[in-house]
């Protein structure tokens, strides 16, 4: 169905190729997972499938790419719309209508699909993705996760033979992600749709993949059976890393496979104490205190009389399903977003009553659409301006960027960065200011496991310096490694608030893979298990 024949691609002005002599065949009805570190060329590979690379990106492509026997060089991308549906990393950038129902119908209108068939497909897609209640909602009022599902639905309605998805679950809560993946699997199994998906949260997709396509970072592509390639892949989900640690063969790709083999490991760990949760900081003076926060959009109440205290040295994970009010709460705390009622106190000041620059000095916020904060022509210029505005030592922002995502060229335009690289740049800009309270909205979108590990160290260092950090996220593995405390929201209210282990282990939705494999004891990460086994060896 998809064939790459000796494909090499250079971006203009870049010496090393993004793709180097790629030969790859993806058969009809395969679900193919594309993996690799941030910025290695995954999006370039995906965009070559329908000709966006090189027709819209520029650059030089050698070799041949065909879909269903049709060469991408012979016709423009719009003429592949009936064959290939594409969802990029930023779904909002692809919307062209005002409401959900109109967006689902738009692509079929362009392909002259008869009205009766259009109506039927719209209804099927609304049900398939669980978004029927959103049909009349304006696109601008949707949460990031809801927008992601609508974007996927918009490319499903024309019934393309190939779906190309770039980070399709990055903005989705665990339940919504499972729903979307179930829909994709149904298309693969029942309709023979070919699905090519790039996803950094491999723990969500790996167990369903028929083929793994891995980009090691030098332009090459390695592909084959997922179990075989996971043996020594440099990016791997926790369940695979746990299998490597325990010496299981073949390696498990799912929690179910791992639990079947974990009895002996659970017995070994029974003699080891589970790491204790961090000491409560409730007796310390809060860096931020919010009372009876209400956020309303028209007749919709997004945040309902929320009380929240943030303490110095604490990393708080804000979790909950899409549309539960997480982002609205963050914006209300920072002072830039609408707040119907309630008060926020940071060092005696309410950020909402201050000017923008003064508010940022007290509460920093990195939004979901991080690129909105970038406005200069190069990465180096953004870093330099951040140092100037923050009165920081020259080079501070660049050093932070290199700790999160090293190797990003200083002369690169921020708009040409991958989603993960762009997010890393914005994080570095905000961390340079170093306010006492830092709010991060889905900060791990587009970051691979290694980048998230580096980011975890940066976040922990911020907390160790006495700052309060709040991370609104659906990334349960990141929460397990990073957070001291978890606050769960539902329908605008806080429904759970406690130590990370206590909250996530008791939840089948928010529990990390290691906890699911080794439960009921509260082991959260592979690193915890590794340290426990090392201590056992040292005492024997």
Image (tube, helix red, strand yellow):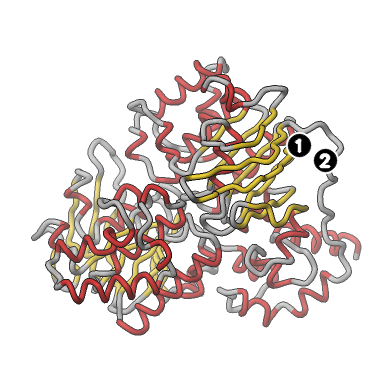
Residues packed near mark 2 inside 10 Å, few (<14), some (14 to 19) or many (20 plus): few
Check whether the beta carbons of the residues at disc 2 and disc 1 lie within 8 A of each other: yes
**Residue 457 occupies which quadrant of the picture?**
top right
User: Residue 439: x percent and y percent?
Assistant: 60, 38
For marks 2 and 1, give the CA distance: 6 Å
| Secondary structure at numbered mark 2 | loop
Judge left or right: residue 6 versus residue 486.
left
Location of residue 24 by image quarter: bottom left
Of residues 256 and 124, which is closer to you in this image? Answer: 124
Tag shown at residue 281: 2
Q: Quadrant of the C terminus?
A: bottom right
Mark seen at residue 311: 1
Front residue of 83/69: it is 83
- Identify the residue at the far front of this view: 299
> Which residue is nearer to you in this view: 425 or 535?
425
Considering the numbered disc 1 on the image, is that residue within a helix, a strand or a loop? loop
Q: Can residue 234 be seen in this view?
A: no
Residue at the image point whose x is 14% and y is 66% from the top? 111
Q: In which quarter of the image is the N terminus?
A: bottom left
- Looking at the picture, how far across and down is residue 416, in whole percent? 32, 39
């Amino acid at each position: 169905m998809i064939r790459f024949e000796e494909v090499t691609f250079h971006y203009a002005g870049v010496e090393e190729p993004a793709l180097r002599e790629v030969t790859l065949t993806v058969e009809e009805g395969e679900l193919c997972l594309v993996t690799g570190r941030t910025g290695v060329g995954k999006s370039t590979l995906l965009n070559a499938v329908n000709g966006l690379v090189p027709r819209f990106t520029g650059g030089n492509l050698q070799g041949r790419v065909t879909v269903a026997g049709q060469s991408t060089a012979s016709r423009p991308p719009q003429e592949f719309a009936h064959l290939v549906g594409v969802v990029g990393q930023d779904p909002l950038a692809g919307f062209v209508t005002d409401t959900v129902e109109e967006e689902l119908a738009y692509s079929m209108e362009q392909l002259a699909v008869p009205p009766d068939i259009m109506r039927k497909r719209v209804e099927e897609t609304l049900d398939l993705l669980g978004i029927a209640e959103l049909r009349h909602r304006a696109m601008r009022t949707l949460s990031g996760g809801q927008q992601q599902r609508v974007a996927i639905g918009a490319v499903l309605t024309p019934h393309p033979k190939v779906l190309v998805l770039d980070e399709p679950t990055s903005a989705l809560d665990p339940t919504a992600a499972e729903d979307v993946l179930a829909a994709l699997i149904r298309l693969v199994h029942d309709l023979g749709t070919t699905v090519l998906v790039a996803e950094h949260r491999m723990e969500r997709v790996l167990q369903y993949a028929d083929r793994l396509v891995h980009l090691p970072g030098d332009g090459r592509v390695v592909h084959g059976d997922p179990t075989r390639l996971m043996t020594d892949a440099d990016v791997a989900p926790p369940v695979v890393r746990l299998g490597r640690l325990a010496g299981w063969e073949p390696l498990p790709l799912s929690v179910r496979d791992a639990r079947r083999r974990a009895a002996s490991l659970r017995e070994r760990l029974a003699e080891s104490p589970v790491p204790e949760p961090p000491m409560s900081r409730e007796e310390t003076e809060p860096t931020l205190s919010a009372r009876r926060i209400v956020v309303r959009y028209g007749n919709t109440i997004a945040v309902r009389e929320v009380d929240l205290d943030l303490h110095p040295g604490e990393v708080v994970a804000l979790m909950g399903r899409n549309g539960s009010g997480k982002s609205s709460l963050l914006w209300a705390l920072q002072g830039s977003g609408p707040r119907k009622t309630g008060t926020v106190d940071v060092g005696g000041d309410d950020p909402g009553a201050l000017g923008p620059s003064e508010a940022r000095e007290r509460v920093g916020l990195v939004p979901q659409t991080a690129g909105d904060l970038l406005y200069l022509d190069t990465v180096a210029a953004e870093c330099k301006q951040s140092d100037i505005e923050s009165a920081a030592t020259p080079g501070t922002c660049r050093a932070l960027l290199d700790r999160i995502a090293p190797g990003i060229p200083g002369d690169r335009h921020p708009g040409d960065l991958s989603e993960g690289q762009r997010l890393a740049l914005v994080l570095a800009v905000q961390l340079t200011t170093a306010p006492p309270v830092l709010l991060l909205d889905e900060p791990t979108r587009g970051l691979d496991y290694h980048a998230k590990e580096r980011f975890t160290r940066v976040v922990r260092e911020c907390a160790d310096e006495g700052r309060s950090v709040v991370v609104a996220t659906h990334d349960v593995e990141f929460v397990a490694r990073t957070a001291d405390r978890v606050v769960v929201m539902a329908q605008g209210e806080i429904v759970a608030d406690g130590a990370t282990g206590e909250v996530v282990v008791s939840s089948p939705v928010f529990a990390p893979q290691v906890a699911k494999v080794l439960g009921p004891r509260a082991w959260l990460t592979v690193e915890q298990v590794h340290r426990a086994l090392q201590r056992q060896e040292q005492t024997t």
